[in-house]
Image (cartoon, rainbow, N blue to C red):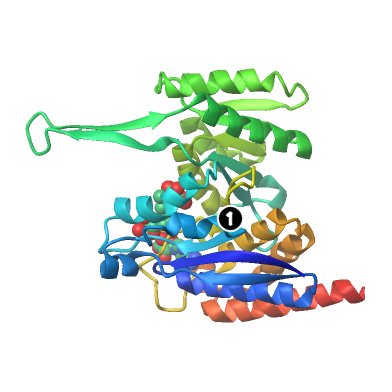
Amino acid sequence: MKTYKIAVIPGDGIGPEVINEGVKVLNKIAELDSSFKFDFTYFPWGCRFYTKHGKMMDDDGIDQLKEFDAIYLGAVGFPGVPDHISLWDLLLVIRKSFDQYVNLRPVKLLRGAHSALANTKNDDIDMLFIRENTEGEYSGAGDWLFKGQDNEVVLQNAVFSRKGTERIIRYAFEVARREGKTLTSISKANALNYSMVFWDEVFEEVSLDYPEVKTASYLVDAAAMLMITDPKRFEIVVTSNLFGDILTDVGAAIAGGIGLAAGANINPKRKYPSMFEPVHGSAPDIAGKDLSNPLATFWSASQMLDFFGYEEYGEVIVSGIEELLSTKELLTPDMGGTATTSEVGDKMVEIVTSQIKGKVLG
Ligand code: NAD
Ligand code: IPM
Ligand code: MN
C-alpha cells in the first residue's frame, strides 16, 4: 500500500478549523481505497508558537519538511505578530525554499456557487491562474535608509530573473497547449519599465515555441476591470507574483467568495514537497467561532489528489463541493447558510463516501 506523508501546518486563526475538516475528508477517501493511505504529521508552527518561542517555526523547520510528499497548510498571520515577520518566516520561506514556483489558482464558478457578478453563468467564469510564486515583487530585497530622518527612503525591489520568468511562462504555455485553451499574460510594461518590459519580451519569445496556442496580453489595470465586465475572455492566465495575488482575490469574489478559493504551490520537478492551501487568510474576525468556510480547503485537497495522480478523487471532491453548494442550509454564514465548519465537514465526508461507494458499485 502506498503511503503519502503529509506535513500539516494548521497555522493561525481559522487555519486549524478548516484544515481539520480537510484532513477528515482526505482520510475518508484513503479509507475507501485500499491502495493508499495518508500519514499526517502535525506541526504547531505559527503565531502562537512565535509568542512562546520567538520564532515562527523550528530552526531546522525547512529540513524537517523536506522529507514529506506534500504540505497541507491552513493560514498564517495573526494580530500581535507583525505580518511581514509571520508570513516571511513561515509561508513565504516554504514557497521559496521548496522552489514552489507555480501557484495554481482556479477561478471557476462551480455549480451552485454565487458570483458577485449578476447574471453570470457557470461557463462564463472558468479560468486557471498560474501565478509566479517565488520572485518578482516578492523578492524580499530592499532597503530602509535614513530611518526616521527627513531624507528617509525605502526601497522594495522586484527581481525578475530570466530563469524564473521563462519557466513560469513556459509552464503556462504547456498547460494551455494540453488543454487547448487561450493563454493570457497580464503585466504592466507601460509603467514598470524594466520588469514588465522584460516579462512581455519573454512571453513573446516563449510563444514562438507554441504556435498552436492562442495568446492575449493585457495591462493589469485593464485586466482587473475585464475580469468583472467580461470574465469569459480569460482561460489560462499567467502573471507575476503580486498581480496574481491581487487578481486571484478579485477572482474569488466573482467565483463564489474567498471561502471557496483554492490554491496549490507546486514544485514541478518534484524535488521538494508542494504545498496545498486555501487562498484566504486566518480571518481573525471570525476565528474560534466555528463559522469558517472549509470549502476552499477541500478544493485544495482535491488539487493535492490531482497532483498525486488520483484525479478521479480530485473530481469527487469538486463535485462534492458542488453538491454542498446546492443545499444552502449546509453552508457556512459567509455563503448565506447556517451550518458550522464541522457540520460542513461531516456532510462532505458523507457526500464523498456515497459518491465513491456509488462509483465502485456502479
Ligand atoms: P482573510 O482572508 O483572512 O479575511 C478577509 C475576509 O474574508 C474576512 O472578513 C474573513 O472573515 C473572510 N474570510 C476569509 N476566509 C474565510 C473563510 N474560510 N470562511 C469565511 N470567511 C472567510 O484576509 P485578511 O483579513 O486580509 O488577513 C488576515 C491575516 O491572514 C493577515 O495576517 C494576513 O497576512 C493573513 N493571510 C494569510 C494568508 C495565507 O496564509 N495564505 C493569506 C491571506 C492573508
Ligand atoms: C496569498 C497571501 C500571501 C501572498 C500573503 C499572506 C503573504 O495573500 O497566498 O494569497 O501574498 O502570497
Ligand atoms: Mn492573497
Residue assigned mark 1: 115
Position of the N terminus, as image quadrant, is bottom right
State yes or no: Cβ of the residue under disc 1 lies below 8 Å from any atom of ligand 1.
Answer: no
Residue closest to the eye, 230 or 143: 143
**Residue type at numbered disc 1:** Ser
Name the secondary structure under disc 1: loop
- Could you say which is closer to the camera, residue 182 or residue 227? 182
Q: Residue at x 58, y 27 (%)?
A: 166
Q: Say left or right for 361 vs 43.
A: right
- Bin the neighbour count of mark 1 within 10 Å (Cα to Cα): few under 14, some 14-19, many 20 and up: many
The C terminus sits in image quarter: bottom right
Q: Is residue 257 visible?
A: no
The residue depicted at 71 percent of the width and 34 percent of the height is 174
Whether residue 147 is visible to the viewer of this picture, yes or no, is yes
In the rendered view, tell whether residue 226 sits above or below residue 324: above
Measured as percent of width and height from the top left, residue 136 is found at 44, 33
Considering every residue shown, the one lying at the far right of the view is 362
| Percent of width and height locating residue 309 | 75, 56
Total labels: the figure holds 1
Q: Is residue 171 left or right of residue 222?
A: right
